[in-house]
């Protein structure tokens, strides 16, 4: 049947089986439990002020440091301030600077595909939010991905001692403000920074609007942008990753960028990278890699197994005739089957109009939409033919 139902978000094939290291999650869980200690220590105005200050300082260090500087090199600075940014970011207890940058670069390379580090589209919301953090697969720092950073011995030292800055920060707060300061000021703000940051990996790929076609499910979300000092403009960021400014429009509040501008004015940083006008307008043709990813999402949004079953039932005689004629040579059977499926302009195969309508639901407007739809149709034909041929399809090389 021709598909007219509204699409669910496309779900990519799962990657390798995830092995969770539950022992690694114990300190994370205990930090949440410690927050309940405020029942006994009480909550004072000074504690809340410390929590707010530490939240702001560490959120800036994570968003401007870990993310925009170390992961994307969106501005330049000297080694001393580079170390300060890394140290402050590590007080958030989100592992080491090199580990963070390496995993984030990996995420952008494979966003919302089976190789993504943390995709709610692929592995579910909670895995993307925090589960991936405790998997064996992602526990080590891939130094090959961050060679530009790993050349600095001070950053390698910090990465080898990922939680030392957080321990020192917690100890300093305890010395200054006692137990209530430690529980409320340090632990409350730490947990808040965790979940605000993690929400960009989870919520920002599920809830919000998409201004640009990026080949993934990244979205803009104004209230996440407020909580995360600008990171909530996530679709903007995936559209142009190397910009120091993620709120592309004047009305898109980006607190981290405003602080970066101030730091540039006093000479601590320089060469802030801005999104070019044509990038903000989004009127340039998409890169081939983005077209390919978007086409994969579009093709996967259709019920391939059901379409294959209909094709198999409708053309069973012809398919069996090909099998006998080509004596089991699957490549030859697939060639003729693809040609047959390509010419079907009626159910069960979606038409070009169906693909364009689905693309309009899934993606923002783009001058490359015809390219996306054309490539998605080819991918859909290939996937349907593989499903029709069943186990034999595995013998056929996948087309580029």
Image: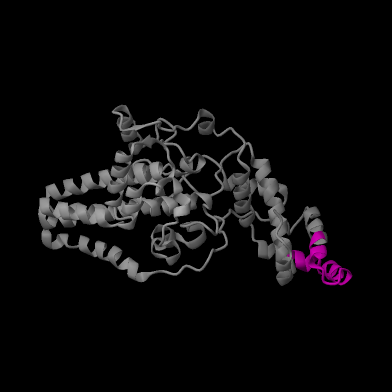
Q: How many marks?
A: 0
Q: Position of residue 227 (x, y in %)?
A: 33, 45
Where the N terminus falls, by quadrant?
Answer: bottom right
Q: Is residue 392 above or below residue 248?
A: below
Q: State yes or no: residue 47 in magenta.
A: no
Q: Position of residue 318 (x, y in %)?
A: 85, 67
Q: Position of residue 299 (x, y in %)?
A: 64, 54
Q: Is residue 4 left or right of residue 60?
A: right
Give residue 188's quadrant in the image: bottom left
Q: Is residue 197 left or right of residue 216?
A: left
Q: Is residue 246 above or below residue 309?
A: above
Q: Position of residue 366 (x, y in %)?
A: 60, 38
Judging depth in this view, the residue of 132 and 302 nearest the camera is 132
Residue found at x 33% / y 40%: 79
Residue found at x 57% / y 45%: 363
Give residue 3's quadrant in the image: bottom right
Q: State yes or no: residue 327 in magenta.
A: yes
Task: Name the magenta segment's main secondary structure.
Answer: helix
Q: Is residue 241 visible?
A: yes
Q: Is residue 253 visible?
A: no
Instruction: State the extent of the magenta-drawn residues as a range.
Output: 310-335
Q: Is residue 4 above or below residue 77?
A: below
Residue found at x 64% / y 39%: 368
Q: Is residue 303 left or right of residue 262?
A: right
- From this viewpoint, which residue is outermost toward the right? 325
Judging depth in this view, the residue of 173 and 350 nearest the camera is 173
Colour theme: one colour
Judging depth in this view, the residue of 291 and 108 nearest the camera is 108
């Amino acid at each position: 049947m021709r598909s007219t139902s509204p699409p669910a978000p496309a779900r990519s094939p799962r990657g390798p089986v995830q092995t969770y290291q539950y022992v690694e999650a114990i300190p994370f869980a205990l930090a949440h439990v410690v927050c309940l200690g405020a029942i006994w220590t009480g909550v004072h105005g000074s504690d809340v002020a410390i929590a707010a200050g530490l939240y702001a300082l560490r959120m800036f260090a994570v968003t401007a440091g870990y993310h925009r500087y170390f992961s994307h090199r969106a501005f330049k600075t000297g080694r001393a301030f580079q170390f300060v940014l890394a140290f402050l970011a590590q007080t958030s207890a989100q592992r080491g600077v090199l580990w963070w940058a390496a995993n984030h670069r990996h995420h952008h390379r494979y966003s919302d595909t089976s190789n993504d580090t943390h995709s709610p589209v692929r592995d579910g919301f909670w895995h993307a939010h925090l589960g991936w953090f405790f998997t064996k697969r992602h526990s080590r720092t891939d130094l090959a991905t961050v060679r530009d950073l790993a050349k600095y011995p001070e950053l390698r030292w910090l990465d080898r001692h990922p939680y030392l800055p957080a321990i020192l920060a917690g100890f300093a707060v305890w010395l200054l403000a006692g137990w209530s300061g430690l529980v409320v000021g340090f632990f409350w703000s730490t947990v808040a920074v965790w979940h605000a940051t993690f929400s960009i990996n989870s919520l920002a790929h599920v809830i919000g609007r998409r201004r640009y076609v990026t080949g993934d499910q990244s979205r803009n979300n104004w209230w996440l942008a407020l909580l995360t000092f600008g990171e909530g403009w996530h679709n903007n960021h995936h559209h142009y990753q190397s910009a120091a400014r993620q709120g592309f429009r004047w009305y898109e509040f980006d607190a981290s960028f405003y602080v970066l501008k101030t730091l540039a004015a006093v000479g601590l940083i320089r060469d802030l990278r801005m999104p070019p006008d044509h990038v903000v307008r989004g009127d340039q043709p998409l890169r081939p890699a983005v077209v390919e990813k978007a086409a994969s999402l579009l093709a996967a949004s259709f019920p391939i197994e059901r379409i294959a079953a209909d094709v198999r039932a409708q053309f069973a005689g012809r398919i069996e005739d090909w099998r006998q004629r080509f004596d089991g040579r699957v490549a030859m059977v697939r060639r003729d089957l693809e040609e047959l499926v390509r010419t079907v302009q009626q159910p069960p195969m979606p038409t070009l109009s169906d693909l364009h309508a689905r693309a309009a639901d899934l993606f923002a407007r783009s001058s490359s939409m015809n390219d996306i739809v054309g490539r998605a149709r080819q991918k859909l034909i290939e996937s349907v033919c593989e499903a029709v041929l069943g186990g034999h399809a595995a013998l056929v090389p996948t087309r580029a």
